């Protein structure tokens, strides 16, 4: 039996908009096992990013619990790092210095720091670009720097909030493959938010379909396909169709993104 590294139990969350109380999440429960890639999939406003922020320690539930590796999450921790759609590299720092930033404040030797930074950069294929600056890199390469910075921290969990949404199709596909290659080697647990059904099917071990107003987990769908996956295969299209049918059953009108 695999270890559950993330446990979300009966989480409720509301926000106030003027005099109106908006119920964003209602009795949300799910778990993620160590080494899994699990995707939260749903239309805008269903609470996906709010859930991700709770797991990251940036938001707190009104009710319920969010547990990371057996401990209640009170604040952000380096055991669990977040990758955003906005890459957030410092433009005045080189690739090397941006990745080193993830280890700021760590009580480790300079030698160990260098080893971790270089290992992370080699994993994402950027060891030949150490002294370039963000403006000299493509969008895909910038995202690889951000991934390397997260990997250098050696977290147990990486949270990803639509990290490839701003990239063109070819860069997105390439980085999806890179992510799978790295995740297979490091066995890092990944919790991903996306609007892209193809991306969810391609990457995920399980997909959690969310309905909205308020946000709930409507369906937990295991993706029983060997990785790497063939987007043109009939089995891939079977899962795509199944997910669209589940959205129809949930009552949400979901407009999928297709990358063909």
Image (tube, grey):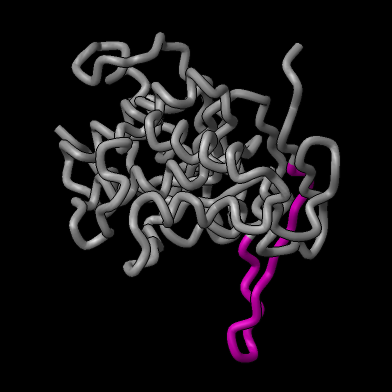
Residue 137 horizontal/vertical position (percent): 21, 53
Of residues 51 and 253, the one nearer the viewer is 51
Instruction: Classify residue 40 as left or right of residue 133.
Output: right
Visible residue check, residue 137: yes
Task: Check the image and report above or below for 256 versus 243.
Answer: below
Q: Residue furthest bottom?
A: 18
Residue 39 inside the magenta-drawn segment: no
Question: What segment is highlighted magenta in the picture?
Answer: 8-24
Task: Check the image and report above or below for 77 versus 5.
Answer: below
Of residues 67 and 145, the one nearer the viewer is 145
Visible residue check, residue 209: no
Task: Check the image and report above or below for 86 versus 145.
Answer: below
Q: Can you say which quadrant of the picture contains the N terminus? A: top right
Residue 159 horizontal/vertical position (percent): 54, 45
Instruction: Classify residue 189 as left or right of residue 2.
Output: left
Task: Check the image and report above or below for 102 versus 112.
Answer: below
Residue 135 horizontal/vertical position (percent): 21, 62
Which residue is pictured at 34% across the width and 15% down the height?
228
Residue 82 horizontal/vertical position (percent): 54, 51
């Amino acid at each position: 039996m695999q270890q559950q590294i993330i446990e979300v139990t009966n989480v409720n969350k509301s926000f106030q908009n003027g005099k109106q109380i908006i119920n964003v999440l209602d009795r949300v429960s799910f778990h993620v096992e160590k080494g899994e890639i699990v995707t939260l999939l749903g239309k805008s406003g269903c609470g996906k990013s709010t859930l991700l922020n709770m797991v990251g320690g940036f938001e707190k539930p009104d009710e319920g619990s969010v547990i990371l590796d057996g401990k209640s999450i009170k604040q952000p921790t380096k055991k669990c790092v977040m990758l955003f759609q906005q890459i957030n590299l410092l433009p005045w720092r080189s690739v090397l210095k941006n990745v080193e930033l993830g280890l700021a404040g760590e009580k480790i030797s300079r030698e160990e720091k260098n080893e971790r930074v270089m290992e992370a950069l080699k994993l994402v294929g950027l060891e030949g670009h150490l002294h370039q600056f963000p403006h000299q890199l493509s969008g895909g390469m910038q995202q690889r720097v951000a991934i390397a910075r997260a990997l250098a921290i050696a977290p147990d969990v990486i949270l990803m909030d639509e990290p490839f949404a701003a990239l063109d199709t070819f860069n997105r596909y390439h980085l999806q493959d890179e992510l799978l290659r790295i995740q297979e080697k490091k066995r890092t647990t990944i919790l991903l938010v996306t609007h892209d059904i193809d991306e969810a099917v391609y990457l995920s071990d399980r997909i959690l379909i969310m309905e909205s107003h308020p946000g709930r987990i409507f369906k937990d769908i295991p993706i029983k396909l060997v990785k790497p996956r063939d987007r043109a295969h009939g089995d891939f299209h079977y899962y795509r169709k199944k997910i669209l049918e589940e959205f129809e059953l949930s009552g949400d009108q979901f407009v999928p993104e297709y990358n063909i």
